[in-house]
Image: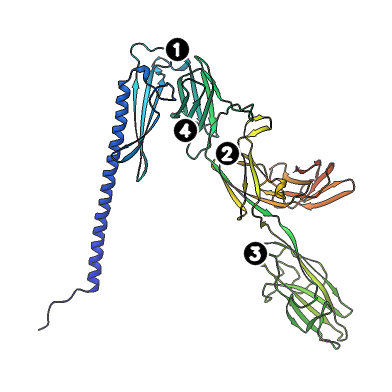
Amino acid sequence: MRSSQRGVTLLDTLVGTSLMLVVFMGISAAFRLSVDVITTNKARAGGIALANERIEYLRSLPYTQLGTSGGVPAGALAQTESITLNGVPYTRRTLIQYADDPRDGSGAADTNSITADYKIGRIDVSWESRSGVRHITIASRFSPIGIETAVPGGTLVISAVNAAGATISGAQVRVVNASTSPAIDTTTFTNASGTVTIIGAPASANYQITVSDSGYSTAQTYSTTPQNTNPSPANLTVTEAHTTNGTFAIDILCSATVRTWTPIQGSTWEDTLADASKTATTSSTEISGGELRLAGSAPYPLAGDMQSIALGPSRLAQWTMLSWDANTPPGTSARISLYNSTGSALIPDAQLPGNSTGFTTSPIDLSGISTSTYALVRVGIHLETADDTVSPSITSYRVDSRYGPTPLPNITFGVRGNKTIGSGPSGTLYKYDQSFSSGVAAGYTVPSLEWDTYTISVGGATGYDISSSCPAQPQSLAPGASLITDIHLLPHTTHSLLVHLRSGTTSAPIAYADITLSRTGFSTTTQTDACGHAFFSDLVSSSAYSVSASSTGYTTTAASTTVSGTSATELLFN
Protein backbone atom coordinates (compact mmCIF):
# COMPACT_ATOMS: atom_id res chain seq x y z
CA MET A 1 0.00 0.00 0.00
CA ARG A 2 1.37 3.50 -0.99
CA SER A 3 2.07 5.78 1.98
CA SER A 4 0.12 9.07 2.09
CA GLN A 5 2.87 10.81 4.07
CA ARG A 6 5.49 13.10 2.45
CA GLY A 7 8.57 15.01 3.69
CA VAL A 8 9.03 18.80 4.08
CA THR A 9 10.31 20.29 0.85
CA LEU A 10 12.87 23.09 0.49
CA LEU A 11 10.10 25.39 -0.77
CA ASP A 12 8.08 24.77 2.40
CA THR A 13 11.11 25.63 4.50
CA LEU A 14 11.80 28.87 2.62
CA VAL A 15 8.18 30.01 2.84
CA GLY A 16 8.01 29.27 6.54
CA THR A 17 11.29 31.01 7.23
CA SER A 18 10.16 34.08 5.26
CA LEU A 19 6.91 34.30 7.20
CA MET A 20 8.76 34.04 10.51
CA LEU A 21 11.22 36.71 9.37
CA VAL A 22 8.39 39.10 8.49
CA VAL A 23 6.72 38.50 11.86
CA PHE A 24 9.90 39.00 13.85
CA MET A 25 10.86 42.11 11.86
CA GLY A 26 7.47 43.60 12.75
CA ILE A 27 7.93 42.70 16.39
CA SER A 28 11.45 44.19 16.36
CA ALA A 29 10.23 47.44 14.77
CA ALA A 30 7.38 47.69 17.26
CA PHE A 31 9.82 47.10 20.12
CA ARG A 32 12.20 49.79 18.86
CA LEU A 33 9.31 52.22 18.45
CA SER A 34 8.16 51.46 21.97
CA VAL A 35 11.65 52.11 23.34
CA ASP A 36 11.86 55.39 21.40
CA VAL A 37 8.47 56.52 22.69
CA ILE A 38 9.37 55.65 26.27
CA THR A 39 12.79 57.33 26.00
CA THR A 40 11.31 60.44 24.39
CA ASN A 41 8.54 60.71 26.97
CA LYS A 42 11.02 60.22 29.79
CA ALA A 43 13.29 62.97 28.44
CA ARG A 44 10.30 65.26 27.83
CA ALA A 45 9.03 64.71 31.36
CA GLY A 46 12.45 65.66 32.70
CA GLY A 47 12.53 68.78 30.52
CA ILE A 48 9.09 69.84 31.75
CA ALA A 49 10.17 69.27 35.35
CA LEU A 50 13.28 71.43 34.94
CA ALA A 51 11.30 74.21 33.25
CA ASN A 52 8.59 74.16 35.94
CA GLU A 53 11.22 74.12 38.67
CA ARG A 54 12.79 77.31 37.31
CA ILE A 55 9.45 79.06 36.80
CA GLU A 56 8.40 78.28 40.39
CA TYR A 57 11.72 79.59 41.64
CA LEU A 58 11.20 82.83 39.70
CA ARG A 59 7.78 83.20 41.31
CA SER A 60 9.38 82.95 44.74
CA LEU A 61 11.73 85.89 44.08
CA PRO A 62 10.96 89.54 44.79
CA TYR A 63 10.11 91.45 41.61
CA THR A 64 13.27 93.55 41.88
CA GLN A 65 15.47 90.43 41.88
CA LEU A 66 14.03 88.98 38.69
CA GLY A 67 16.95 89.25 36.29
CA THR A 68 19.86 87.32 34.83
CA SER A 69 23.59 87.68 35.06
CA GLY A 70 24.65 89.79 32.10
CA GLY A 71 21.04 90.46 31.13
CA VAL A 72 18.66 93.38 31.14
CA PRO A 73 17.29 93.53 33.81
CA ALA A 74 20.33 92.33 35.72
CA GLY A 75 20.13 89.68 38.41
CA ALA A 76 21.85 86.68 39.92
CA LEU A 77 20.30 83.96 37.75
CA ALA A 78 22.51 82.25 35.17
CA GLN A 79 21.35 82.66 31.59
CA THR A 80 22.50 79.15 30.59
CA GLU A 81 22.92 75.99 32.70
CA SER A 82 23.92 72.42 31.86
CA ILE A 83 21.95 69.91 33.95
CA THR A 84 21.80 66.11 33.90
CA LEU A 85 18.57 64.54 35.13
CA ASN A 86 17.88 60.80 35.08
CA GLY A 87 20.90 60.29 32.86
CA VAL A 88 19.72 62.84 30.26
CA PRO A 89 21.88 65.95 29.69
CA TYR A 90 19.80 69.15 29.34
CA THR A 91 20.56 72.78 28.60
CA ARG A 92 18.34 75.23 30.47
CA ARG A 93 18.19 78.85 29.34
CA THR A 94 16.56 81.63 31.32
CA LEU A 95 15.54 84.91 29.71
CA ILE A 96 13.93 87.76 31.63
CA GLN A 97 12.89 90.98 29.93
CA TYR A 98 10.75 94.01 30.60
CA ALA A 99 7.54 94.09 28.55
CA ASP A 100 5.42 96.99 27.35
CA ASP A 101 1.71 96.25 27.78
CA PRO A 102 -0.19 97.61 24.74
CA ARG A 103 -3.35 98.19 26.83
CA ASP A 104 -1.96 101.52 28.06
CA GLY A 105 -0.22 102.32 24.80
CA SER A 106 3.11 101.17 23.45
CA GLY A 107 6.40 103.04 23.17
CA ALA A 108 6.01 106.76 22.73
CA ALA A 109 2.21 106.35 22.79
CA ASP A 110 2.22 104.92 26.34
CA THR A 111 -0.29 106.96 28.35
CA ASN A 112 1.91 107.19 31.44
CA SER A 113 5.26 107.10 29.58
CA ILE A 114 6.23 103.96 31.47
CA THR A 115 7.07 101.14 29.04
CA ALA A 116 8.44 98.71 31.65
CA ASP A 117 4.95 97.51 32.63
CA TYR A 118 5.96 94.05 33.82
CA LYS A 119 8.59 91.32 33.31
CA ILE A 120 8.35 88.19 31.19
CA GLY A 121 10.32 85.13 32.18
CA ARG A 122 10.94 82.57 29.48
CA ILE A 123 12.51 79.19 30.25
CA ASP A 124 13.79 76.98 27.42
CA VAL A 125 15.00 73.44 28.14
CA SER A 126 16.63 71.50 25.28
CA TRP A 127 18.09 68.03 24.87
CA GLU A 128 19.32 65.67 22.14
CA SER A 129 17.03 62.92 20.89
CA ARG A 130 17.13 60.42 18.03
CA SER A 131 15.22 62.89 15.86
CA GLY A 132 17.42 65.87 16.75
CA VAL A 133 17.30 68.65 19.33
CA ARG A 134 14.01 68.88 21.26
CA HIS A 135 12.75 71.86 23.25
CA ILE A 136 10.34 72.63 26.06
CA THR A 137 9.57 76.32 26.51
CA ILE A 138 7.53 77.86 29.33
CA ALA A 139 6.82 81.57 29.77
CA SER A 140 5.24 83.50 32.60
CA ARG A 141 4.38 87.12 33.36
CA PHE A 142 5.63 88.79 36.55
CA SER A 143 3.96 92.04 37.59
CA PRO A 144 5.20 94.48 40.25
CA ILE A 145 3.23 94.94 43.44
CA GLY A 146 1.14 98.07 43.20
CA ILE A 147 1.43 100.61 40.39
CA GLU A 148 4.11 100.20 37.75
CA THR A 149 7.10 102.48 38.17
CA ALA A 150 9.59 103.78 35.65
CA VAL A 151 12.93 101.99 35.43
CA PRO A 152 16.19 103.78 34.70
CA GLY A 153 17.81 103.49 31.29
CA GLY A 154 16.53 103.57 27.76
CA THR A 155 15.07 101.19 25.23
CA LEU A 156 17.07 99.25 22.69
CA VAL A 157 15.13 98.06 19.60
CA ILE A 158 16.96 95.70 17.25
CA SER A 159 15.42 94.70 13.92
CA ALA A 160 16.55 91.84 11.66
CA VAL A 161 15.80 92.01 7.93
CA ASN A 162 16.93 90.10 4.85
CA ALA A 163 18.58 91.45 1.71
CA ALA A 164 15.18 92.51 0.34
CA GLY A 165 14.26 94.32 3.57
CA ALA A 166 11.73 91.71 4.78
CA THR A 167 11.71 91.03 8.52
CA ILE A 168 13.25 87.84 9.93
CA SER A 169 11.72 86.15 12.95
CA GLY A 170 13.73 83.85 15.18
CA ALA A 171 17.07 85.52 14.39
CA GLN A 172 19.59 85.39 17.22
CA VAL A 173 20.52 88.76 18.75
CA ARG A 174 23.44 89.08 21.11
CA VAL A 175 23.91 92.30 23.09
CA VAL A 176 27.26 92.90 24.81
CA ASN A 177 28.41 95.93 26.79
CA ALA A 178 31.41 95.60 29.09
CA SER A 179 31.28 99.26 30.16
CA THR A 180 28.01 98.97 32.13
CA SER A 181 27.86 97.84 35.75
CA PRO A 182 27.10 95.04 35.87
CA ALA A 183 28.39 94.14 32.42
CA ILE A 184 25.81 93.01 29.85
CA ASP A 185 26.10 89.89 27.72
CA THR A 186 22.70 88.53 26.76
CA THR A 187 21.33 86.56 23.84
CA THR A 188 17.73 86.54 22.66
CA PHE A 189 15.71 86.05 19.48
CA THR A 190 13.59 88.30 17.28
CA ASN A 191 9.82 88.04 17.55
CA ALA A 192 7.30 87.47 14.76
CA SER A 193 7.84 91.08 13.66
CA GLY A 194 11.58 90.56 13.40
CA THR A 195 12.45 92.75 16.38
CA VAL A 196 13.95 92.50 19.85
CA THR A 197 12.99 95.18 22.35
CA ILE A 198 15.14 95.55 25.46
CA ILE A 199 13.53 97.95 27.93
CA GLY A 200 15.63 99.34 30.79
CA ALA A 201 18.98 99.07 29.04
CA PRO A 202 21.45 101.14 31.14
CA ALA A 203 22.35 104.47 29.56
CA SER A 204 25.78 103.86 28.02
CA ALA A 205 27.80 103.81 24.84
CA ASN A 206 29.49 100.72 23.38
CA TYR A 207 26.52 98.41 22.96
CA GLN A 208 27.88 95.78 20.60
CA ILE A 209 25.10 94.06 18.66
CA THR A 210 25.48 90.83 16.70
CA VAL A 211 22.60 89.40 14.65
CA SER A 212 22.82 85.92 13.13
CA ASP A 213 20.82 82.87 12.20
CA SER A 214 21.61 79.29 11.22
CA GLY A 215 22.70 79.20 7.58
CA TYR A 216 22.63 82.99 7.40
CA SER A 217 25.28 85.68 7.32
CA THR A 218 26.11 87.75 10.39
CA ALA A 219 25.67 91.49 10.85
CA GLN A 220 27.09 93.46 13.76
CA THR A 221 28.35 96.73 15.12
CA TYR A 222 32.08 97.40 15.54
CA SER A 223 34.18 98.91 18.30
CA THR A 224 36.66 101.72 17.79
CA THR A 225 40.20 100.32 17.67
CA PRO A 226 43.61 101.68 16.58
CA GLN A 227 43.10 99.79 13.31
CA ASN A 228 39.44 100.81 12.86
CA THR A 229 39.24 104.41 14.00
CA ASN A 230 35.97 105.08 12.16
CA PRO A 231 33.86 101.93 12.54
CA SER A 232 30.68 101.59 10.50
CA PRO A 233 28.29 100.64 11.86
CA ALA A 234 29.68 101.70 15.22
CA ASN A 235 28.50 100.30 18.55
CA LEU A 236 25.16 101.73 19.64
CA THR A 237 24.59 104.26 22.41
CA VAL A 238 21.58 104.13 24.73
CA THR A 239 20.52 107.38 26.40
CA GLU A 240 18.26 107.81 29.39
CA ALA A 241 14.53 107.63 28.59
CA HIS A 242 15.15 107.39 24.85
CA THR A 243 14.80 104.62 22.28
CA THR A 244 17.81 103.52 20.24
CA ASN A 245 17.06 101.64 17.03
CA GLY A 246 19.35 99.40 15.01
CA THR A 247 18.48 97.49 11.85
CA PHE A 248 20.72 94.63 10.69
CA ALA A 249 20.49 92.81 7.37
CA ILE A 250 21.34 89.10 7.16
CA ASP A 251 20.48 86.49 4.56
CA ILE A 252 21.23 82.97 3.32
CA LEU A 253 24.93 82.28 2.86
CA CYS A 254 26.51 81.86 -0.56
CA SER A 255 29.55 80.07 -1.96
CA ALA A 256 32.03 80.80 -4.72
CA THR A 257 34.29 78.30 -6.46
CA VAL A 258 37.46 79.74 -7.96
CA ARG A 259 39.35 77.69 -10.57
CA THR A 260 42.78 78.70 -11.82
CA TRP A 261 43.94 78.02 -15.38
CA THR A 262 46.49 78.90 -17.96
CA PRO A 263 44.56 80.53 -20.84
CA ILE A 264 43.91 79.09 -24.29
CA GLN A 265 47.19 79.25 -26.20
CA GLY A 266 48.48 78.55 -29.66
CA SER A 267 50.18 75.29 -30.57
CA THR A 268 52.07 74.18 -33.69
CA TRP A 269 52.70 70.60 -34.76
CA GLU A 270 55.35 70.50 -37.48
CA ASP A 271 57.19 67.84 -39.46
CA THR A 272 60.40 69.08 -41.07
CA LEU A 273 60.84 65.63 -42.66
CA ALA A 274 64.29 65.15 -41.21
CA ASP A 275 63.24 61.52 -40.62
CA ALA A 276 60.19 59.30 -40.67
CA SER A 277 59.39 59.56 -36.94
CA LYS A 278 56.15 61.50 -37.63
CA THR A 279 55.11 59.33 -40.55
CA ALA A 280 52.52 56.56 -40.18
CA THR A 281 52.27 55.10 -43.70
CA THR A 282 53.91 55.57 -47.10
CA SER A 283 53.09 54.26 -50.56
CA SER A 284 55.51 54.89 -53.48
CA THR A 285 57.04 57.80 -51.51
CA GLU A 286 60.13 58.19 -49.37
CA ILE A 287 61.69 60.69 -46.97
CA SER A 288 65.24 61.58 -47.88
CA GLY A 289 67.41 64.65 -47.56
CA GLY A 290 64.80 66.56 -45.54
CA GLU A 291 61.97 66.15 -48.04
CA LEU A 292 59.17 63.85 -49.05
CA ARG A 293 59.23 62.83 -52.73
CA LEU A 294 58.26 59.96 -55.00
CA ALA A 295 60.23 56.83 -54.14
CA GLY A 296 63.47 55.83 -55.79
CA SER A 297 65.01 57.62 -58.74
CA ALA A 298 64.00 58.31 -62.31
CA PRO A 299 61.98 56.83 -63.69
CA TYR A 300 59.77 57.76 -60.68
CA PRO A 301 56.38 56.21 -59.98
CA LEU A 302 53.64 58.45 -61.34
CA ALA A 303 51.93 58.82 -57.93
CA GLY A 304 52.56 58.18 -54.27
CA ASP A 305 51.00 58.83 -50.84
CA MET A 306 51.97 59.43 -47.23
CA GLN A 307 50.02 59.80 -44.01
CA SER A 308 51.30 61.39 -40.84
CA ILE A 309 50.79 59.99 -37.38
CA ALA A 310 47.70 61.19 -35.48
CA LEU A 311 48.32 64.69 -34.14
CA GLY A 312 46.61 67.20 -31.89
CA PRO A 313 47.25 68.84 -28.52
CA SER A 314 45.57 67.74 -25.30
CA ARG A 315 42.67 70.03 -24.30
CA LEU A 316 42.19 71.02 -27.92
CA ALA A 317 40.19 74.26 -28.16
CA GLN A 318 40.30 74.99 -31.90
CA TRP A 319 41.94 73.88 -35.11
CA THR A 320 43.29 76.98 -36.85
CA MET A 321 45.53 76.40 -39.90
CA LEU A 322 47.24 73.86 -42.16
CA SER A 323 50.30 75.03 -44.10
CA TRP A 324 53.18 73.45 -46.02
CA ASP A 325 56.19 74.15 -48.20
CA ALA A 326 56.17 72.36 -51.57
CA ASN A 327 58.30 72.16 -54.70
CA THR A 328 56.18 71.29 -57.74
CA PRO A 329 58.03 71.45 -61.08
CA PRO A 330 55.89 71.71 -64.26
CA GLY A 331 53.80 68.58 -64.78
CA THR A 332 53.80 67.69 -61.07
CA SER A 333 51.45 68.36 -58.16
CA ALA A 334 51.24 67.95 -54.37
CA ARG A 335 47.81 67.70 -52.77
CA ILE A 336 47.17 67.87 -49.01
CA SER A 337 44.12 66.50 -47.19
CA LEU A 338 43.11 65.88 -43.59
CA TYR A 339 41.88 62.52 -42.28
CA ASN A 340 40.37 61.26 -39.03
CA SER A 341 42.61 59.95 -36.26
CA THR A 342 42.94 56.46 -37.81
CA GLY A 343 43.44 57.70 -41.34
CA SER A 344 40.48 55.66 -42.54
CA ALA A 345 38.24 58.53 -43.65
CA LEU A 346 38.60 62.05 -44.94
CA ILE A 347 37.19 64.93 -42.88
CA PRO A 348 33.99 65.80 -44.77
CA ASP A 349 33.79 68.87 -46.98
CA ALA A 350 30.94 70.14 -44.77
CA GLN A 351 33.57 70.91 -42.13
CA LEU A 352 36.57 71.46 -44.42
CA PRO A 353 35.42 72.56 -47.89
CA GLY A 354 37.58 71.10 -50.70
CA ASN A 355 39.15 68.45 -48.51
CA SER A 356 37.87 65.57 -50.63
CA THR A 357 39.83 66.74 -53.71
CA GLY A 358 42.87 67.93 -51.74
CA PHE A 359 44.50 71.34 -51.40
CA THR A 360 47.29 72.67 -53.53
CA THR A 361 47.64 76.19 -52.14
CA SER A 362 48.92 76.89 -48.62
CA PRO A 363 47.63 77.87 -46.03
CA ILE A 364 44.20 76.35 -45.31
CA ASP A 365 41.76 77.57 -42.66
CA LEU A 366 40.79 74.72 -40.30
CA SER A 367 38.55 76.66 -37.89
CA GLY A 368 35.39 74.91 -39.12
CA ILE A 369 36.50 71.45 -37.98
CA SER A 370 34.71 70.07 -34.91
CA THR A 371 37.13 69.62 -32.03
CA SER A 372 34.87 67.09 -30.34
CA THR A 373 34.52 64.85 -33.41
CA TYR A 374 38.11 65.36 -34.54
CA ALA A 375 40.25 65.74 -31.44
CA LEU A 376 43.08 64.12 -33.44
CA VAL A 377 43.71 64.28 -37.20
CA ARG A 378 46.17 62.92 -39.74
CA VAL A 379 47.75 64.81 -42.62
CA GLY A 380 47.61 63.01 -45.95
CA ILE A 381 49.93 63.98 -48.84
CA HIS A 382 49.43 62.84 -52.44
CA LEU A 383 52.32 63.39 -54.89
CA GLU A 384 51.78 63.04 -58.64
CA THR A 385 53.84 63.56 -61.81
CA ALA A 386 53.14 63.34 -65.53
CA ASP A 387 56.89 63.11 -66.24
CA ASP A 388 58.62 60.15 -64.60
CA THR A 389 61.94 62.00 -64.70
CA VAL A 390 60.71 64.67 -62.28
CA SER A 391 59.30 64.34 -58.74
CA PRO A 392 57.36 66.90 -56.70
CA SER A 393 58.44 67.25 -53.08
CA ILE A 394 57.29 68.55 -49.68
CA THR A 395 59.97 70.02 -47.41
CA SER A 396 57.79 70.61 -44.34
CA TYR A 397 54.17 70.82 -43.23
CA ARG A 398 52.49 72.27 -40.12
CA VAL A 399 49.16 72.14 -38.30
CA ASP A 400 48.34 75.07 -36.01
CA SER A 401 45.75 74.84 -33.26
CA ARG A 402 44.73 76.36 -29.94
CA TYR A 403 44.57 74.42 -26.70
CA GLY A 404 43.48 75.03 -23.15
CA PRO A 405 42.57 76.19 -20.69
CA THR A 406 44.90 74.00 -18.61
CA PRO A 407 44.53 73.67 -14.82
CA LEU A 408 47.12 75.72 -12.92
CA PRO A 409 47.41 74.42 -9.34
CA ASN A 410 48.52 76.01 -6.06
CA ILE A 411 47.74 79.62 -6.93
CA THR A 412 47.14 82.01 -4.02
CA PHE A 413 44.21 84.32 -4.69
CA GLY A 414 42.34 86.95 -2.72
CA VAL A 415 38.58 87.43 -2.39
CA ARG A 416 37.32 90.83 -1.25
CA GLY A 417 33.73 92.04 -0.87
CA ASN A 418 32.49 95.59 -1.36
CA LYS A 419 30.91 95.90 2.09
CA THR A 420 33.00 97.87 4.56
CA ILE A 421 33.22 97.99 8.36
CA GLY A 422 35.02 101.32 8.69
CA SER A 423 38.39 102.87 8.04
CA GLY A 424 41.67 103.48 9.79
CA PRO A 425 45.31 104.40 9.23
CA SER A 426 45.63 101.73 6.53
CA GLY A 427 42.55 103.00 4.66
CA THR A 428 39.20 101.34 4.05
CA LEU A 429 38.50 98.16 6.02
CA TYR A 430 36.42 95.57 4.21
CA LYS A 431 34.03 93.19 5.91
CA TYR A 432 35.37 90.28 3.86
CA ASP A 433 38.96 90.20 2.64
CA GLN A 434 40.55 86.74 2.68
CA SER A 435 43.23 84.77 0.82
CA PHE A 436 43.06 81.14 -0.32
CA SER A 437 44.96 78.66 -2.47
CA SER A 438 43.56 76.77 -5.44
CA GLY A 439 45.51 73.73 -4.21
CA VAL A 440 46.60 70.72 -6.19
CA ALA A 441 43.14 70.47 -7.76
CA ALA A 442 43.49 74.02 -9.19
CA GLY A 443 40.17 74.94 -7.61
CA TYR A 444 38.79 75.94 -4.22
CA THR A 445 35.25 76.57 -2.99
CA VAL A 446 35.03 79.55 -0.66
CA PRO A 447 32.20 78.80 1.80
CA SER A 448 29.99 80.98 3.98
CA LEU A 449 30.01 84.14 1.89
CA GLU A 450 27.29 86.70 2.42
CA TRP A 451 25.51 88.38 -0.45
CA ASP A 452 27.80 91.08 -1.79
CA THR A 453 29.85 92.10 -4.81
CA TYR A 454 33.24 90.38 -4.83
CA THR A 455 36.56 90.94 -6.57
CA ILE A 456 39.12 88.15 -7.03
CA SER A 457 42.78 89.08 -7.29
CA VAL A 458 46.23 87.53 -7.47
CA GLY A 459 49.30 89.39 -6.28
CA GLY A 460 52.46 89.83 -8.31
CA ALA A 461 54.20 87.64 -5.72
CA THR A 462 52.39 84.64 -7.19
CA GLY A 463 54.29 85.19 -10.43
CA TYR A 464 51.07 85.60 -12.44
CA ASP A 465 48.64 88.22 -13.71
CA ILE A 466 44.95 87.68 -14.42
CA SER A 467 44.55 87.64 -18.20
CA SER A 468 40.82 86.85 -18.09
CA SER A 469 38.02 86.15 -15.65
CA CYS A 470 34.81 84.29 -16.48
CA PRO A 471 32.43 85.72 -15.48
CA ALA A 472 33.93 89.18 -15.52
CA GLN A 473 34.70 90.97 -12.28
CA PRO A 474 33.47 92.32 -9.97
CA GLN A 475 30.85 89.62 -9.47
CA SER A 476 27.60 89.96 -7.54
CA LEU A 477 26.40 87.08 -5.35
CA ALA A 478 22.70 86.92 -4.49
CA PRO A 479 21.55 85.31 -1.22
CA GLY A 480 21.91 81.54 -1.40
CA ALA A 481 23.68 81.68 -4.76
CA SER A 482 26.62 79.56 -5.86
CA LEU A 483 29.07 80.87 -8.45
CA ILE A 484 31.96 79.30 -10.36
CA THR A 485 34.68 81.68 -11.52
CA ASP A 486 37.45 80.68 -13.92
CA ILE A 487 40.59 82.76 -13.56
CA HIS A 488 43.09 82.57 -16.45
CA LEU A 489 46.66 83.48 -15.59
CA LEU A 490 49.80 84.45 -17.50
CA PRO A 491 53.32 85.08 -16.18
CA HIS A 492 53.56 88.38 -14.33
CA THR A 493 55.16 91.39 -15.99
CA THR A 494 55.84 94.78 -14.42
CA HIS A 495 53.26 96.57 -16.58
CA SER A 496 50.19 95.00 -18.18
CA LEU A 497 46.69 95.92 -19.27
CA LEU A 498 43.48 93.85 -19.07
CA VAL A 499 40.73 95.13 -21.38
CA HIS A 500 37.12 94.12 -20.82
CA LEU A 501 34.77 94.71 -23.75
CA ARG A 502 31.04 94.85 -23.03
CA SER A 503 27.87 95.85 -24.81
CA GLY A 504 26.77 99.33 -23.87
CA THR A 505 23.11 98.28 -23.98
CA THR A 506 23.06 94.78 -22.43
CA SER A 507 26.39 94.79 -20.49
CA ALA A 508 27.08 91.34 -21.97
CA PRO A 509 30.72 90.55 -22.79
CA ILE A 510 31.65 90.73 -26.48
CA ALA A 511 33.80 87.83 -27.66
CA TYR A 512 36.31 87.62 -30.50
CA ALA A 513 36.46 91.34 -31.22
CA ASP A 514 39.73 92.95 -32.32
CA ILE A 515 41.37 95.07 -29.63
CA THR A 516 44.21 97.38 -30.67
CA LEU A 517 46.53 98.98 -28.12
CA SER A 518 48.80 101.72 -29.42
CA ARG A 519 50.99 104.67 -28.53
CA THR A 520 53.66 106.58 -30.41
CA GLY A 521 55.90 104.04 -32.13
CA PHE A 522 53.94 101.02 -30.89
CA SER A 523 50.79 99.15 -31.93
CA THR A 524 49.56 95.62 -31.31
CA THR A 525 46.24 93.85 -31.88
CA THR A 526 44.68 90.82 -30.25
CA GLN A 527 41.20 89.34 -29.87
CA THR A 528 38.90 89.20 -26.87
CA ASP A 529 38.21 85.72 -25.52
CA ALA A 530 34.81 84.15 -24.92
CA CYS A 531 34.37 86.32 -21.83
CA GLY A 532 35.20 89.59 -23.57
CA HIS A 533 38.73 89.99 -22.23
CA ALA A 534 41.94 90.92 -24.04
CA PHE A 535 45.27 91.00 -22.24
CA PHE A 536 48.45 92.89 -23.08
CA SER A 537 51.59 92.08 -21.11
CA ASP A 538 55.17 93.33 -20.90
CA LEU A 539 54.19 96.93 -21.64
CA VAL A 540 55.99 100.19 -20.98
CA SER A 541 54.46 102.35 -18.28
CA SER A 542 52.73 105.22 -20.04
CA SER A 543 49.74 107.53 -19.79
CA ALA A 544 49.45 107.93 -23.57
CA TYR A 545 48.01 104.59 -24.67
CA SER A 546 44.98 104.40 -26.93
CA VAL A 547 42.81 101.29 -26.88
CA SER A 548 40.23 100.62 -29.58
CA ALA A 549 37.80 97.82 -30.40
CA SER A 550 36.22 96.75 -33.67
CA SER A 551 33.89 93.92 -34.57
CA THR A 552 31.31 93.12 -37.23
CA GLY A 553 27.97 94.68 -36.37
CA TYR A 554 29.40 97.20 -33.92
CA THR A 555 30.63 100.76 -34.19
CA THR A 556 34.36 101.03 -33.62
CA THR A 557 35.04 102.50 -30.19
CA ALA A 558 38.23 103.92 -28.70
CA ALA A 559 39.46 105.43 -25.45
CA SER A 560 42.69 106.60 -23.88
CA THR A 561 44.11 104.74 -20.91
CA THR A 562 46.99 104.80 -18.48
CA VAL A 563 49.21 101.77 -17.99
CA SER A 564 51.14 101.56 -14.75
CA GLY A 565 51.68 98.25 -13.03
CA THR A 566 48.82 95.77 -13.28
CA SER A 567 46.17 97.91 -14.99
CA ALA A 568 42.65 97.33 -16.29
CA THR A 569 40.14 99.25 -18.37
CA GLU A 570 36.67 98.74 -19.78
CA LEU A 571 35.27 99.52 -23.22
CA LEU A 572 31.59 99.73 -24.12
CA PHE A 573 30.45 98.74 -27.60
CA ASN A 574 27.28 100.23 -29.10
In this rendering, the label closer to the viewer, 1 or 3? 1
Q: Is residue 574 among what the camera can see?
A: no
Residue bearing the label numbered 3: 372
| Alpha carbon distance from label 4 to label 2 | 17 Å
Residue bearing the label numbered 4: 171
- Which of disc 2 and disc 4 is earlier in sequence? 4
Task: Please name the amino acid that badge 1 sits on.
Answer: Ser
Marks 3 and 4 in Cβ contact (< 8 Å): no
- Which of disc 3 and disc 1 is earlier in sequence? 1
- Label 4 element class: loop
Mark 2 nearby-residue class (10 Å; few <14, some 14–19, many ≥20)? many
Task: Please name the amino acid that badge 4 sits on.
Answer: Ala
Residue bearing the label numbered 1: 113
341 or 551, which lies in front?
A: 341
* Residue 159, x across and y down, in percent: 50, 27
| Alpha carbon distance from label 3 to label 4 | 52 Å
Which residue lies at the image location 81% right of the left edge and 67% below the top edge?
A: 363
Which residue lies at the image location 24% right of the left edge and 67% below the top edge?
A: 15
| Alpha carbon distance from label 2 to label 3 | 38 Å
Residue bearing the label numbered 2: 451
